[in-house]
Structure formats: structure tokens, C-alpha cells
Image (spheres, helix red, strand yellow):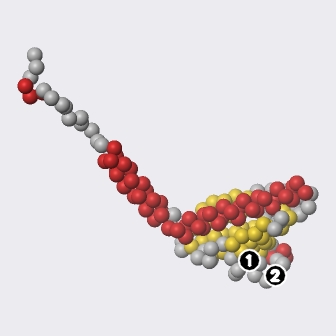
Amino acid sequence: MIHAGRRGARRASGFSLLEVLMVMAIIAIASLLAMAAMSGGIDGVRMRASAKEIAANLRYARAQALSTGRAQKFVIDPVAHTWRTVNDRDGEIPRSLNIVFTGKRGLQSRAGEGAILFFPDGASTGGRVQLNVGNAAWNVDVAWLTGEVTLKRGEVDR
């Protein structure tokens, strides 16, 4: 038996593709805004990227010391916002970031620069490069005994 009210085409229930895509776009935009607010905005992103780059090049200098059997140096200039290391590797740090270097004073090539020396056995003179903006900071630490390079969020050194 066929009911008179149910004849003809049925309307499908659910969401259209356009509605689903609009909701996904709104969620993506909200997520980006939340991440930017939590990470300190664009300067926070720059700070983390610069800290990762510095850590990678400190590890590179250590690896070169181990592989060549010769001491290798990583030099940072907080005033010029630059760094350099072995094999003509160098880079710049955004001017919007503050740089605090803590390390052995006797390794400075010039006043205002800081340096970390890696020895052929993997050990180092140790030190810390801190990048900060506002109250947010990233620390790149180098252990003197092992030369291990670690990267972590930190508190602003004053």
C-alpha cells in the first residue's frame, strides 16, 4: 500500500558539501588565530624558527668537530643579530628578537661576540643562546661535558 503523502522524490537529509567546507574553513581560521595568540604572534614564530636554526647549526659544528678531528667554533653577534660557524655557514636573526648569550668570555674574537667551541671528542666550552621577545623565550643550551645541544622554552634572562 502506498501512502499519498510519500509519493515522489524524497528530500535527502544532511549537509551539503558547501556547508561542510564553510565550517572547515571557519575552524581553520579560528585555529590559526588561536595559535598566533598563544605563540606570541609572528614574532613568536620567528623566535622559534631562529632558535631551531641556531640549534641545528650548533649540532652541525659539533658533528664537524667529531668528523674532522679538529675543534670547530660557533660565533654569535647579539648586536649585529648574526651568527656564523664552520664551512662558511652563517645567518641572521630577526631584529625584533632580543639575544642573550652566556658562555666562556675568553673565546670572543671581538668585543660583543660570543662563541662556543666544540672539541674533537664532542665536548664543548658550553653556553646558552637565548632568543626572547616580551615574556616569551627559547633557550638553546650546549652542555660543556658532552656538547649536547638542547632547545626548550625558557624564562627571559635579564
> Which residue is painted at 10% across and 16% down in the image?
1
Q: In the displayed image of the protein, which residue is found farthest to the front?
A: 8
Q: Which mark is residue 110?
A: 2
Q: In the displayed image of the protein, which residue is found farthest to the left?
A: 4
Characterize the local packing of mark 2: few (<14), some (14-19) or many (20 or more) Cα atoms within 10 angstroms.
few
Horizontal and vertical percent position of residue 145: 82, 59
Horizontal and vertical percent position of residue 62: 81, 59
> Which residue is painted at 41% across and 58% down in the image?
29
> Which residue is painted at 65% across and 64% down in the image?
51
Horizontal and vertical percent position of residue 133: 57, 73
Report the side of 44 relative to 77 (left or right): left
For mark 2, give the secondary structure.
loop
* Residue 100 visible in the displayed image: no
Q: Badges 2 and 1: C-beta atoms under 8 Å apart?
A: yes
Report the side of 17 relative to 150 (left or right): left
For mark 1, give the secondary structure.
strand
Which picture quadrant has residue 114?
Answer: bottom right
Q: In the displayed image of the protein, which residue is found farthest to the right?
A: 69
Q: In this view, does 32 lie above or below 131?
A: above
Report the side of 111 relative to 26 (left or right): right
Q: Name the residue under label 1.
A: 77
Q: Which of 53 and 130 is in front in this view?
A: 53
Report the side of 144 relative to 55 (left or right): right
Instruction: Give the residue type that dot 2 points to.
Output: Arg
Instruction: Give the residue type that dot 1 points to.
Output: Asp
Q: Is residue 31 above or below residue 43?
A: above
Horizontal and vertical percent position of residue 35: 47, 60
> Which residue is painted at 20% across and 35% down in the image?
11
Characterize the local packing of mark 1: few (<14), some (14-19) or many (20 or more) Cα atoms within 10 angstroms.
many
